[in-house]
Image (spheres, coloured by chain):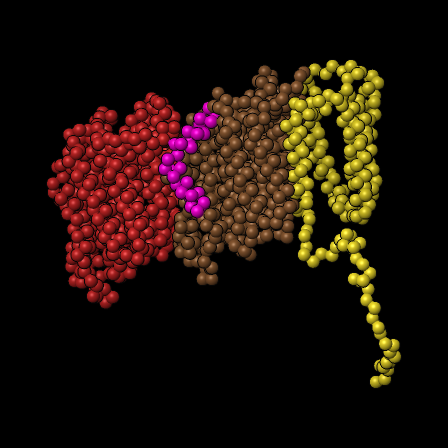
Amino acid sequence: MLKILLLLPLLGALFISALPGRRARLIRQAALVISGATLAWSIWLASAFDPSHADVQLVESHSWNPRLGSAFSLAVDGISLPLVWLATLLAFIAILASGGIRERVKGYYLLLLLLECAMLGVFTARDWSLFYVFWELTLLPLFFLIDRWGGLGRQKAALNFVLYTMGGSVFMLIALLMLYDASPGHSFDMDAIRRGALALPETAQVTLFLALLIGFGVKMPIFPLHGWLPLTHVEAPSPVSILLSGILLKMGSYGLIRATWTLPAAAEALQGVLMTLAMVSLVYGGVLAWQQRDLKAMIAYSSVSHMGVVLLGVATLNSAGLIGAVMQMVAHGLVAGTLFLLAGLLYERTHTRDLADYGSLVAVMPRFAFFTILAFICAAGMPGSAGFVAEMHALVGGFERWGGWVVLLSLSVLISMAYAIRTVGRLFTGPASPRMQGLPDLSRSEMTAALMLSFGSVALGIHPGPMLDLIATSVGRYALLFGA
Amino acid sequence: MDFASVVFYFLAAILLLSGLRVITAKNPVHAALALVLAFFTAAGIWLLLEAEFLAITLVLVYVGAVMVLFLFVVMMLDINLEELRRGFWDYLPFAALVAGLMIIQMVLVLWGRDFGLEAPVPKPADYSNTKELGRVLYTDYVYAFELAAVILLVAIVAAIALTLRRRPNRKVVDPAWQVKQKREGRVYMVNLKPQKPEYKAEDEE
Amino acid sequence: MPFQMPDFIPALPEIFLLAMACVVLLVEAGFKPKTLSYNLTLFTLLGVAVLVVLSGSSDPYYTFNGLFIDDVMGDVLKLMTSLAAIVAVIYSRRYLADRNLLNGEYFALLLFAVLGMMVLISASHFLTLYLGVELLALSLYALVAFQRDSLRASEAAMKYFILGALASGLLLYGMSLLYGVTGSLHLDAIAHALHQQGGDNVVMVFGLVFVVAGLGFKLGVAPFHMWVPDIYHGAPTAVTLFLGSAPKLAAFAFVMRLLVDGLSPLHGDWQQMLAVMAVLSMAIGNLAAIMQTNIKRMLAYSTIAHMGFLLLGILSGSLAGFSAGMFYVLTYVLMSLGAFGMITYLSREGFEAEQLDDYKGLNSRHPWLAAIMGMIMLSMAGLPPLVGFYAKFTVLQALVGSGWIGLAVVAVLFSLIGAYYYLRIVKIMYFDTPPADAPPIQGPTDARVLLSFNGLAVLLLGLLPQPLLAVCAASLQLSYP
């Protein structure tokens, strides 16, 4: 089942590589069909998945490199399944939104599908070495995608991104190797690693957790490790930005949740640190987003702030908080995807990202304006959006743990409201810029993409029950570790 | 001190002095001759150690062949070795310092006691060093012996490959071809009519 | 003591190789067609590979009065050495022909160098170790200088020769000290004697220092690395290709024989020395490589860094570490052959593709070659799913398993720095525009096909490293029961 999920985009990439490079339309359609099929397959997985069961399901394991202690084993639970859906959906959207790519179409779609395969691998791997391989494998397509199809400063951005992430993941690698060494029977299997880790002394666990935190924190990103993010997001082609902020960031927080489960004692010992980092990320990202003139940079910094909510949820180590964290990952994936999609479409039309250049677009592009305002409302976490449900849970979880301190979270909500309103104001009100007249409104395929994402956000906001149940069952098992 | 020790110190002193001469002598021929002396005394020390074969080989090969060849080269090439050695006195203090340090270190380390091997028992008088060496060389160590031969072969091949130049327009003489030539092929009779040379007065201007 | 006829069977590959090298020399003197010596060389190396497989035995077996050891580790390394030499010869044919270097002496010297490696690989005695090293080195000096009208090559050969001689001197001095302490030249007997005397003998350590320094020179690890960039840069690319590939296998065997077979009782001492050398090599290699504009020089510095990483595997001191080191060196040779093979392939008459600028926009000139080169570079950088990742992974695994966690952290940090310059080459090939006057790339088909296989092997072994890992582990298990 899961194997097919990974194979679909991979074989699709192979298929595309066999197509003639000049048939751009054919290639695009093929990529759409393949990613659509992957999306359909991932949704169909729900039918085989038992949401009342807490442990991982749909397990399949193949011997891969027994000498290294690694196996090709895949499985999903209530934490990873929503992320798998998110990944397949956003990959489909990204391909849908790639109509603006005109040159070297073949390589572009091939790399996008490879990236999709790698991301799905990260979320479904049940073996840390497999996880690591997929984790690093995402870098390769991204390096080429950014460096080839990105903006003006793309070369610096691509190199910066790859080296930054690799720099984080080498710490993760060492930590994983040490865990491997401690595991009974020398294996990278997540359960075996956990058994070995539990037997370690607490100081060792804390060290290992910190190393993992660096690796995952770079990706998330957490406050002092976010240096690569604005540059990369600004320079990456918009469809890639969708995937970057929509899914790639979630790989970090997903890994962190798995790490807390592997090293519970360390997570508990470092709870305060995590909380502090979360709060700093929240406020810092928000304030910086407020300061930006560049539309994409603003969305990028807002991601730092939103991922702070995820980190806060993880740091609570209780059921409500963890649910909030997972929910926020999904919610932010949808919202950031929408925002980058719309920002990209706008850039394609205007070739400027400076907020000061826009004005009164509502008259020119009413449909665009509608979706943008909706997306900003969701981003700010207004009731009725998925973000609200997520922040609510994180807030409740945080309150259980720290009481009044979570007022800070409300502060960040205020800040995010502030920059959302400011941006909306800049975009759609004020003096109409003569340069912005006569811009075409959203096309049909762009509408479809925006509609799908917005619908997701709102639907999860209005009717979050099934999703919350799905997440809660698996998260409950994690929360039990911490006596909450 | 027994007789052997006296001989040893005597020879060692000569060896050291001649070695020193090799690097200090101004005249390259003198340096080469000092090296011959050094080899000779070293051979004497080996004799003292009952390594007759090695001692004789040293004299035959190095003194007899290598050094003579070397002397020829030095005398024929007329190299101004003085030029090459110009920096000698400038570098001497530093070099001496380094060498002194190394000597101190080695003396500290190698003060004999650490080797922990008992002195070998002297062999009887009819023991043939040469025969033993030969036996070992061609039986137990035949593999190493052959390898040494291969290394020499490689050295020859390399030397030829790197220095032999087959220039297309080089000027060489083929003796066989030279001997085969007949008079008819080389000499022609040309009848020249006597001519009066015409002088031009060039200084009339 | 009666003389026993040695068993020649285990040494059959060496004997065949020597005989054929002499045949190549004779053929060169007598026959004119230039391709004959080339074909004979390929035939010889192929024959050696077959003989190595046929004459191998599963248990360590001594012959020639203990001067020669035949074990599975040696057999695997010899097999790979001859295969690597075959690949190098095929890659370099056109390059040599263009520069008028395609003649019998070249191939004879190359075969002698391979012989030196094989002797080194199955040496079990200080004498054979030393003779193997000298045979290899002497042939390589000559090969480096083979392009006689190139001033750069002559200078490189001179440097190589002088530093090599110095290294040999250090090595010999150390060996003689160890002989003085242990009274034997047999590696096994030395290990036995050292074990009985305990490790606190000053002379032993003194000798060890000299031996390790000599070893460092031969491996080209810091702080004894000064010759590597000059030689890689100065030598004709075909020679660099050969020099940078097969001898690394012999170097690995050299370290294993000397330190593990012979000096294992002193492992506490040599581990520290290797650790220092490894860290220095990774630092100097990776940092200096960033500043290079010449790709041969850059790869030379990267070699230094890779050799440092290899030392990490060996110094971890466990069987897993040795097998990780062996895996590392095998995969490194594969990548190195590909990288230098590509430089050789892209060079043509009167033109050396050795500046980084020569690779600008390679993708638009020849996408397939660019893809191969890209894979090799990313593999050297250690990105999954290419084989270079598993090479680093296994070494780190062994290192962490032996408790050298600090070293492992240093190693990954430096390989991160290294990733920068490998990625830069990928960037140059894919994202820079090629010079307008770049001629179309054309080369012999056999080299191109082989390069393709080379690149695909890097990917395939990365996806499924298990077979090669198993070979390495099994051969070491059989060789060190």
What letter labels the chain drawn in yellow?
B
Give coordinates of residue C391: x percent, y percent. 43, 35
Whether residue C456 is in magenta: the answer is: yes
Left or right placement of residue B124 versus residue C199 in this view: right
Residue at x 66% of width, y 26% of height = B142
What letter labels the chain drawn in brown?
C
Decide if residue B116 is in sight here.
no
- In this figure, what is the number of numbered marks? 0
Question: Range of the magenta residues?
Answer: C449-477
Q: Quadrant of residue A197?
A: top left
Residue closer to the observer: C200 or A110: A110
Residue at x 47% of width, y 59% of height = C439
Quarter of the image that includes the N terminus of chain C = top right
Residue closer to the observer: C13 or C113: C13
Task: Decide: is A109 above or below A261.
Answer: below
Give coordinates of residue B147: x percent, y percent. 64, 32
Residue at x 25% of width, y 61% of height = A349
What letter labels the chain drawn in red?
A
Q: Main secondary structure of the magenta part?
A: helix
Whether residue A112 is in magenta: the answer is: no
